[in-house]
Image: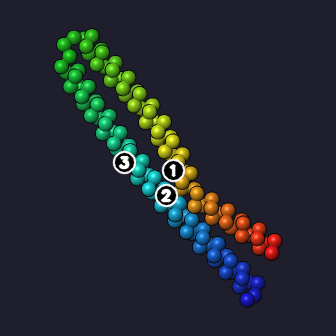
Amino acid sequence: MTDFARFGDEFQKIGQKGFDAAVHSYGEWNKGLQALATRLTENSKRAFEDTTRTWEQLVGAKSIEQVIEIQSQYAKRAYDNFVAEASKLGEWYVGLVQDASKPVEQAVKNSVEQSIKRKVV
């Protein structure tokens, strides 16, 4: 086999491995984004239900003090939920990026190692 043919075969193998890594990476992104969308939908549903309950309590309030107390409790819950959810979503996003980049990182690492072995041999 000529050097040119060998180079062509190696180039084709590297291209296929890169393509496979990209497809796997895309699959990880897709799974992660679907899970994220589900999480956001569930969080929105909980927030809407809490808002509805709070509205019902406000309508039934008997005094301005009771209205202020209900509103204060609602604001505290909403803030606490937002902070907790934002933290969790940040962690999820970091995990998603790490998981989705692993196949590409591994493909690059393998290509570099193979290049080094070929030069040593």
Sequence-first disc among 1 and 3: 3
Q: Residues within 10 Å of mark 1 (few under 14, many from 20)?
A: some
The picture places residue 20, in percent across and down from the top left corner, at 55, 69
Mark-to-mark CA distance, 3 and 2? 15 Å
- The structure residue drawn at horizontal position 71% and vertical position 85%, both measured from the top left corner, is 5
Sequence-first disc among 1 and 2: 2
What's under tag 1, amino acid-wise? Leu
| Dot 1 and dot 2 residues touching (CB under 8 Å) | yes
Q: Residue furthest bottom?
A: 1
| 81 with respect to 24 (left or right) | left
| Dot 1 and dot 3 residues touching (CB under 8 Å) | no
Q: Is residue 103 above or below residue 42?
A: below
- The structure residue drawn at horizontal position 26% and vertical position 25%, both measured from the top left corner, is 54
Q: Residues within 10 Å of mark 2 (few under 14, many from 20)?
A: many
Secondary element at tag 3: helix
- The structure residue drawn at horizontal position 63% and vertical position 59%, both measured from the top left corner, is 105
Q: Is residue 99 above or below residue 10?
A: above
Residue of label 2 = 28
| 37 with respect to 4 (left or right) | left
Secondary element at tag 1: helix
Which quarter of the figure is the N terminus placed in? bottom right
The picture places residue 70, in percent across and down from the top left corner, at 28, 19
Residue of label 1 = 96
Residue of label 3 = 38
What's under tag 3, amino acid-wise? Thr
Which quarter of the figure is the C terminus placed in? bottom right
